[in-house]
Image (cartoon, grey):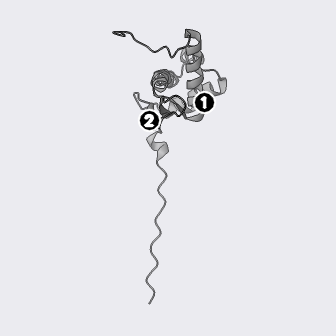
Amino acid sequence: MRHKVRGRKFGRTASHRKMMFRNMVTELFRHERIQTTTEKAKDARSIAERLITYAKAGDLNSRRMAARKLTDPVVLQKLFDVLGPRYADRPGGYTRVLKLDGPRRGDNADMAILGRLVHRAAARKPAQPRREAAPPEG
């Protein structure tokens, strides 16, 4: 029985699990969304949220802490230059897990998309001025 047993192992060793999540979070920040199993998305979400919080702080120690979790320095630069300022006014909840319809074909695993929330100001398109209707002919 699994009473009070916390955490998922995903059938991997600790080092393999750690590297898997490092790769997942790096690709999430690179591509803005990833498709994976629901359980992996839920676990990767907590790491991604913590990294965005580090990017909001923006100091050297935060950058070093984030560099420990990411595998690509270009993605680290994007995290601190683009994503941190984008979510500066948001207190948390930077990512979301959207469950997909239907299981994965090979092993029947529940699938989900882990994606970053689009900032409201960036999501809105600037309003275009309306053209007035042409006067009726006749």
Tell me the quarter of the picture where residue 89 sits. top left
Residue at 57% of width from left, 17% of height from top? 69
Establish if 87 lies above or below 135.
above
Residue 37 coordinates in the image, percent (x, y): 49, 28
Identity of the amino acid at label 1? Lys
Image coordinates of residue 15 in percent, x first then y, are 58, 10
Earlier along the polypeptide chain: callout 1 or callout 2? 1
Q: Looking at the figure, which quarter contains the C terminus?
A: bottom left
Question: Can you tell which of label 1 and label 2 is closer to the viewer?
Answer: 2
Considering the image in quadrants, where does the N terminus appear? top left
Camera-nearest residue between 14 and 70 = 14
Q: Which residue is the extreme one toward the left? A: 3
Label 1: which secondary element: helix
**Does residue 29 appear left or right of residue 90 in this picture?**
right
* Above or below, comparing residue 68 to residue 103 in the picture: above
Crowdedness near tag 2: few (<14), some (14–19) or many (≥20) residues, C-alpha within 10 Å? some
Residue 88 pos. (x, y %)? 46, 30
SS at circle 2: strand
In space, the residues marked 1 and 2 are separated at their CA atoms by 24 Å
Query: Label 1, on which residue?
Result: 78
Residue, far bottom = 138
What numbered label is drawn on residue 4? none
Residue that appears at 46% across and 21% down: 43
Are the two marked residues, 1 and 2, in contact with CB atoms closer than 8 angstroms? no
Question: Image point 48% across, 26% down: which residue?
Answer: 41
How many residues crowd around disc 1 within 10 Å: few (fewer than 14), some, or many (20 or more)?
some
Which residue does the image show at 56% across and 30% down from the upper left?
28
Given the image, on which type of amino acid does mark 2 rest?
Answer: Leu
Residue closest to the eye, 41 or 73: 41
Read off the residue under disc 2.
98
